[in-house]
Image (cartoon, grey):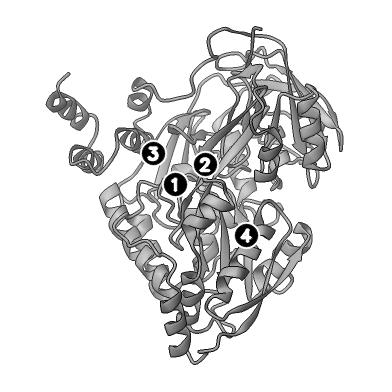
Amino acid sequence: MTKRNEIDALRNLSGDIWNVAVDEYTGGYLKRRDLLKYAALIGLTGFAASQGLGFSGAARAATAGGTVRVGLGQPTKAIDPVTITDPASIGVLSQVGEYLILDDPKDGLQPKLAVSWEADETAKRWTFKLRSGVKFHDGRTVTAKDVVASFERLVDPNSGSSALSAYKGILSKGGAKIVDDETVAFDLDQSNSNFPFYVSSDVYNAVILPADYAGDFEKNFNATGPFKLESFRPKQGATFVRNPDYWGEKALPDRVEIKFFDDEQAQVVALQAGQLDVIPSTTRLELAIEGNPNFKLLSVQASSHDAVHLRTDQAPFTDKRVRRALALTLDREAIVKGLLKGRAIAGNDTPFAPIFPSADPSVPQRKQDIAEAKRLLAKAGVPNGFEVTLTTERAYDIPDYAVIIQNFAKKAGIDIKLNVLPQDAYYGSATFGSSPWLDSNLGITDFGHRGTPDIFLNATLKSSGAWNAAHFKNPDYDALLVDYGKARDLQAQRIAAGKIQALLLDETPEIISYFSQYSRVTSTKVEGVRFTAISHLLLDRVSFVQA
């Protein structure tokens, strides 16, 4: 097919909103893969699938069967899809639980329990068609009643749902409605052209559960996934076996065995001893297996980042010139190369990661400028700098990042004292007034990957945001968020995004100097390990390489 014929064929697939994206593809502003991702977002799932999207099968020279052995950290509490927040629980849940849509880091939104979706002209009502014949592990058929109950549970303020912050201002109780047994509609609080991401694996709590779910998930792990529970031992691990009644391709492995570990070093030792096939990865852990031909590091680019919040309502950060000065002290490229070993991309102090098609790439990248930082401090009345305490969590690479920020800030005369807390102490109750995360003057918080910037934009920076540690209250920003949500096509989204990016660079309520890759370490004996950057671990296509 010639290029012209291809474009004509693309234009015939849908209406004006799709054709704006086709125009961008034709003009070279949008890569083909991003065009296909956008096709899935607006519900052209058949077209996306026809272009080869979706995970590939097992590698050559590999066989099915066997047991995949996985090491994970300790779940922080009982594994309940409604309330989980930790990576280990998400990894366990991945074996049995499924979403309406899977957000694949490579190919974008992939149909799972929903086969298609579309919005009305306002992007305020979204309608999803469900896959026929899907059964829970207990044999009951999934219907719209189960889907509606699952989301009503997540948006109920009395349910203890960990997804409330994601849905705040987007979807409220009563917003999910049964159209028929295989159709669900969502009436949103406000227009949102990215809503399919909110019912995808991006909101890891949004696993579809039976309508009568009573909060006792650990008893049977009853969901719809390719594996079903064999045994579960709190604080020790879990074993899952192939689900013979799965609606899709049956899992290749016979069994998945998951073992919980109290520290990452023990996982490394078990991997090196041949007792595990898959473990999570950190920069320190990677050093232990570097150059070893028996292991491989798998990575995907993500929107994960460690946000530095600056309390805009407390001195010295009430003056945006002071906030910008601190941001200008950081050498982002040096941080990416040094701290993150090149497995990241530079950030520009907004949640718009370069991997988001809606990000405006024309907004200038902030770079280190010590002279300008000093000039801004002088204009703000603190020519000799100031002292401030940075409070953060003892997790991942964050303590090292805090030291790096401390050293860069010294170049402009800013004296940062470090207060590094255990992770649970840092988050506290995760509510304003009783959480060092949300109450500290200056802090660093890790945020996991999302397939769209919406959750970051709303939860961390909106005036009413549940994660607004910067206490940033800007009506112009809030209004721009509404415009961004209403934007129906990529071009309009990018225009709205550019305005948000420019405002955030000017105001600098938070510093985002990098977006990390997400990695797993595996034995070279296994192929087909898949994962998302938000800790889902997908093992149904794993096979074992023959020696």
Q: Amino acid at mark 2?
A: Val
Residue 442 image offset from top left, x and y in percent: 62, 73
Identify residue for label 2.
199
Q: Amino acid at mark 3?
A: Leu
Q: Outermost residue toward the bottom?
A: 381
Identify residue for label 1.
195
Residue at image coords 38%, 28%:
45
In this view, the mark in front (3 or 2)? 3
Q: What is the spatial separation of the Cα atoms under label 3 and label 2, in whole angstroms?
A: 12 Å
The first of marks 1 and 3 along the sequence is: 3
Name the foreground residue: 399 vs 8. 399
Q: Which mark is residue 541?
A: none
Q: Secondary structure at mark 1?
A: helix
Identify residue for label 4.
401
* Residue count near mark 4 (Cα–Cα under 10 Å), binned few <14, some 14–19, many ≥20: some
Residue 301 lies left or right of residue 153; in this view the side is left
Q: Amino acid at mark 1?
A: Phe
Seen in the picture, residue 126 relative to 485 is either above or below; the reply is above
Residue 526 image offset from top left, x and y in percent: 64, 18
State yes or no: discs 2 and 1 in contact (Cβ < 8 Å).
yes
Q: Secondary structure at mark 4?
A: helix
* Residue count near mark 1 (Cα–Cα under 10 Å), binned few <14, some 14–19, many ≥20: many
Q: Secondary structure at mark 2?
A: helix
The first of marks 3 and 2 along the sequence is: 3
